[in-house]
Amino acid sequence: QKEVEQDPGPLSVPEGAIVSLNCTYSNSAFQYFMWYRQYSRKGPELLMYTYSSGNKEDGRFTAQVDKSSKYISLFIRDSQPSDSATYLCAMSEGAGGTSYGKLTFGQGTILTVHP
Amino acid sequence: GAGVSQSPSNKVTEKGKDVELRCDPISGHTALYWYRQRLGQGLEFLIYFQGNSAPDKSGLPSDRFSAERTGESVSTLTIQRTQQEDSAVYLCASTQTRFAEGEQFFGPGTRLTVL
């Protein structure tokens, strides 16, 4: 079993839809939770960064972390064709220990928003 | 300012040849990571540098893989005697903080194809 599980999709939605992306994880030491967006043939770019449990909102994006369930989500409101990309969840144990901040990624979900 | 750059952007090589992949991190970023992304997969951690030292090499898949960093700047990932399973996109990321609680900035990657 992988440390981080993410449904690869693909997911296709009409413009304006609300998109929900999810990841589950097994390592209870993860403290930092991130969502990256990756366009084709580009490097990942950070969308959302959350420490511990709770919600964080940034414009059309909302990230949720439920550490008790080991479950994280990203919601995209009023989705746009420009949101079409691969969305990767990533997690880190953070400072201390020997993890050195390395990220553990989910497989990525391919999202297409059609006009 | 300039982001993380990687070269070459694409590399096609024959099985058994050695390859060198280069990463130029953002100036002043002390932490540098290498990841590998196989087709349709998430990113896998390879190695972490703090300055010129590599305290975590746990992700290197075999002794054919090595990496170095000089001048707390440029890093080179070397793959000796390449195999077809080495075909992937190799991504480099850098961050300012020692234990990377901050954002990791990714380069565009080097797409390696081993024939």
Image (cartoon, helix red, strand yellow):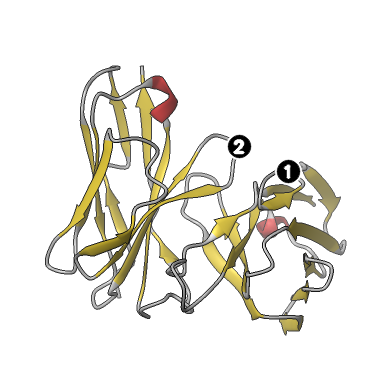
Residue B26: x, y in percent?
Answer: 29, 70
| Mark 2: secondary structure | loop
Residue A13: x, y in percent?
Answer: 84, 51
Q: Who's the residue at 56% across and 51% down the image?
A: A39
Question: In which quarter of the view is residue B32 placed?
Answer: bottom left
| Mark 1: secondary structure | loop
Task: Please identify the quadrant where the N terminus of chain B is shown.
Answer: bottom left
Q: Is residue B7 above or below residue A54?
A: above
| Residue lying furthest front | A97
Q: Chain of mark 2?
A: B
Residue A81: x, y in percent?
Answer: 72, 56
What is the CA distance from the residue labelled 2 to the residue labelled 1? 8 Å
Of B40 and A51, the residue lying toward us: A51
Q: Is residue A72 above or below residue B111?
A: below
Disc 1 marks which amino acid? Answer: Pro
Q: Chain of mark 1?
A: A
| Residue lying furthest left | B71
Residue, disc 2: B40
Q: Who's the residue at 27% across and 33% down the image?
A: B64
Q: Mark 2 near mark 1, Cβ–Cβ under 8 Å? A: yes
**Dot 1 crowding, Cα within 10 Å, few <14, some 14–19, many 20+:** some
**Dot 2 crowding, Cα within 10 Å, few <14, some 14–19, many 20+:** few
Q: Is residue A88 above or below residue B63?
A: below
Disc 2 marks which amino acid? Answer: Gly
Residue A8: mark: 1
Question: In which quarter of the view is residue A19 placed?
Answer: bottom right
Residue B16: x, y in percent?
Answer: 25, 18
Of A57 and A113, the residue lying toward us: A57
In this picture, residue B8 sits left or right of residue A84 = left
Task: Please identify the quadrant where the C terminus of chain B is shown.
Answer: top left
